Image (tube, rainbow, N blue to C red):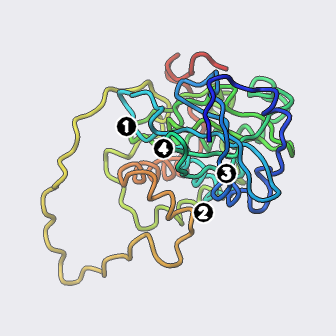
Amino acid sequence: MTLYQDFDQEQIASGPHDVTPADQGAEDFVRTADIGDGWLHPRSSNYTFVVELTDGPRHGFGVYKPERGEAPLWDFPSGLYRRECAAFELAKLLGWALVPPTVEREGEAGIGSLQLFVSSGDDSNFFTLKESHRDQLFRMAVFDMLANNADRKGGHCFLGPAGELLGVDHGLTFHIQNKLRTVIWDFAGSQIPDTLLTDVEALQTTLCSDSEPTALAQPTASSLSTQPKPATRPIASHPPTAPPPPASAPPTPPSPLTPSTPPALTALTALISPRELEALCSRVETILADPTMPHPYSRHDIPYPPL
């Protein structure tokens, strides 16, 4: 495997692209395919490579984001690639095919995320789709609220080969503090459709039934869109011992992870921290309690550049 600095856009665009996100086995393809040569993407803030993928007769490309290529951030710890993978697992739990298959892989530059590369041949983006694909964009906006996406630029969503809306670049997600930054504010003040709430309710049942979100992780309905806040002092790792339960207390609920746990939930809990998982549950509960799309608080809630 060789990583090249010059991005060969013509070769990548011409394919082959034998595997699409909707194909059965697309995730397994990304997980097991041999990784070939790669090219440094010219428009990425971190080191991102488009690499060749080969699995027998099937050929395609993947987006490889090694942890070693991540620029340090003051508010997110290293390991942004795990959040890329976690966004895919969250979309699977919701039953929303919004994120191309994304897995942890070891590549030439070390551990990182590998996502199935999807070419947007029509150069679509949020701004070209905002009038014609409102229902799909509404779902994307709710997904970003759940994932607490701090970087939904217009070019981070586009149409896939089957005309489906896809979202990419989810490295700035799942923070315990509210970080929602997006260009998709068109639905501010609107009620979330029942069809989407049904999926969020199912996510709550799967994800949050045995969790107990802390006060830190519980935003109010009005706090889902606020400007970034300074980092808080870490909470002590050894909280005071709780008093013993009364004799009549019910049995301790089972662990959220059991043999029947969905694989996507098992993967998600391994990719984000317990506090981040609690914060996700809190966002789920906030949306169900008040299913109204938030308004932007200030210009800081809109990423720049917007595309």
Locate residue 103 relative to residue 6 in the image: left or right. Answer: left
**Which residue in the protein does label 1 denote?**
77
- Name the mark on residue 101: 3
- Name the mark on residue 202: 2
Label 2 to label 1, Cα distance in Å?
30 Å
The residue drawn where x is 37% and y is 46% is 217
**Badge 3 density bin: few <14, some 14–19, many ≥20, Cα 10 Å:** many
Q: Between label 2 and label 4, give the one nearer the viewer.
A: 4
Label 2 to label 3, Cα distance in Å?
21 Å
**Which residue in the protein does label 4 denote?**
110
Label 3 to label 4, Cα distance in Å?
19 Å
Label 2 to label 4, Cα distance in Å?
36 Å
Residue 231 occupies which quadrant of the picture?
top left
- If you read the primary sequence from the N terminus, does the residue marked by circle 3 or circle 1 appear first? 1
Amino acid type, callout 2: Ala
Locate residue 177 relative to residue 93 in the image: left or right. Answer: left
